[in-house]
Image (cartoon, rainbow, N blue to C red):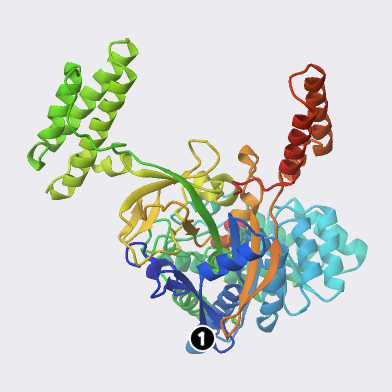
Amino acid sequence: AELYGIDEWSSGYFGISAEGEVIVRAPTAEGETQVSLMEIVDGLQQRGLQMPVLLRLENLVDKRISTLNDSFALAIEASGYQGQYRGAFPIKVNQQSHVIAEIARFGERYNHGLEAGSKAELMIALATLKNRESLIICNGYKDPEFITLGLQARKLGFKCFFVVETLAELPHIIERSQALGIEPLIGVRLKLSTKVEGHWSEDSGDRSLFGLNTNELITVVDELRKANLLHCFQLLHFHLGSQIPNIRSIRAGVLEACRYYIELVAEGAPLGYIDLGGGLAIDYDGTSSTSGHSRNYSVQEYCIDVVEAIQECLDEHQIVHPTIVTESGRATVAHTAVLLFNILDVTHFEPTEPLGELPQDCHEMIQNLWHSLSVIKPANLQESYNDLLYYRDKIRDLFHSGDISLRHRALGENIYWAGMQKVASLVPQLKRVPAELESLQEQIADIYYGNFSVFQSLPDSWAIQQVFPVMPIHRLNEEPNRQAIIADLTCDCDGKLQKFAGPVGESKTLSLHPIRAGEEYYLGVFLVGAYQETLGDLHNLFGDTNVASVRINTDGSIDFVHEIHGDSIADVLSYVEYEPNALYQQFRQTAEQAVRDGIISVADRQQMLAAYSEGLRGYTYFEK
Ligand code: PLP
């Protein structure tokens, strides 16, 4: 457990069983039920869902919603805050219908609502939310059609807010509202000067893309007053960025927003809601720090800080405590999905066979390399490393010029890898490690080939170097004595994982077990429930993976609530405008011509066409 930092990043939802398997500790009506992920993998296989599979754990969706709402309730009660909390899940963070349906179903008891950033997302919200007390927050650039839909939602009784992000939206809101005779609920997005650290820091500050500056805010107040709609201006919104690492920035942002709140109330806006947007971070690397993949606060601390900061600031001005709204996405769903995949193959960087004796007729450079290997000791590691590299390159040159044979070059490579392994094994004995030797472990790490696509399933790992916890889900009572990085199926040099959550923060290699012939080796990538699915792309035409949503019952039984088969090859081909049937016909003609030309028999043709046709229906990932 220590090696993979599971106790640090899993928030207690995952652990390791006595049998050495990763278990999910599923919150259920009567406490907690533990189920091994390997048991779920068995169930997936029985249902014909091959690896890779995106596993959704519905119990965790519910638990995250209750954690957020209960933590705010506790903070509100403890501080004597007079207002309430209302969550709004931002649909963009995971638009999958089963996820949104579960959030709406379970969230109803907390009046948990939805945030929509586009017309399509508003349509999802209107069709899914049943509870009229829940909020629908409309962010993003809004055209008249978007506004009309939102106003109609008002007529149906939904608490649907338009958050004005740019001044250009305001005349449309006023015009549509007057034309339809429906009063809107209006919010305004602030452009705060508080800057946060982390990857999404540009969502805040003067140059942030959205939000109104002070002059624009005054224009909104004046225009709304002129249109007799100032009483509709009830919500103040800001969003400092996602995954905010430092609680101090959150507090600073809230305090700055409160200053606007006070001033806008003084201007006559009857504000009643303060919306902090997203930003509540999770601990991807298990460091509980401001590393950028983590945060220095818990959900409870976040809630306490937010509630207290608002209370402190507004009490000074005797302003009624507003309803606190957050649009937490990542913190609601990241824990709820695990990507499971199997390992297909491994490349080692070590001698392919024991070195034995050096053959008599070796070139002098091979003898020198052999000598360099034989003298390696802690006192000369840098020198040995340099020599090994030098002689290996010389041997490569000799091969290129035709002066040594393929077999002797292969022997040279084996001696070289034996030397590098020996140097690496002695590096931990050094008091001061030279810079070049620091990265040696990565240079000689195995490459484990996983049956998945980074671009399709973990796009943030490629696009923004996001660290996700990765570990084997079984054999955890055996020592994982290999150091490895993980490559995917895309044959793209970016299609790999080489940053891992380790026992002391981020590490560049992952400890894995040697694979055993005839036995599957399964890994899980955790905390992938936020943002990854719809950002994923079709690089090399690897499509959507199989998806399974499970619910774990109190007695330990597993309900496979939804099973979705991933894209077939025909599906992904049609996404890029091929017509699978036409492709089949074209191939059929090629095969027919080959029969006419006497290259293949009619029976061959039948076999080829059957394989092509079956291939079109197959999974885009490696199938057994
Ligand atoms: N609200 C708005 C306006 C956003 O832009 C975002 C995402 O960046 C979110 C909410 C969700 O943020 P998070 O996933 O950090 O909770």
Left or right: 52 in relation to 361: right
Q: Which class describes the residues within 10 Å of circle 1: few (<14), some (14-19), or many (20+)?
A: some
Please indicate whether residue 145 sits to the left or right of residue 408 in the image: right
Judge by depth and name the residue closer to the eye, 70 or 516.
516
Relative to the observer, which residue lies in front, 586 or 602? 602
Residue 230 sits in quarter: bottom right
- Position of residue 410 measured from the top left corner of the image (x, y, whole percent): 31, 26
Q: Which residue is mark 1?
A: 74
Q: Amino acid at mark 1?
A: Leu
Q: Is residue 32 visible?
A: yes
Residue plotted at (16% across, 20% down) = 360
| In front of the other: 124 or 273 | 124
Task: Please tell me which residue is depicted at 61% across the width and 39% down the height of the picture.
Answer: 539
Q: Residue at x 51, y 68 (%)?
A: 37
**Residue sitting farthest toward the left:** 379
Residue 161 picture location, percent across and down: 74, 67
Q: Secondary structure at mark 1?
A: helix
Query: Measuring 57% from the left and 50% from the top, which residue is drawn there?
Result: 208
State the image quarter where residue 293 is shown.
Answer: bottom left
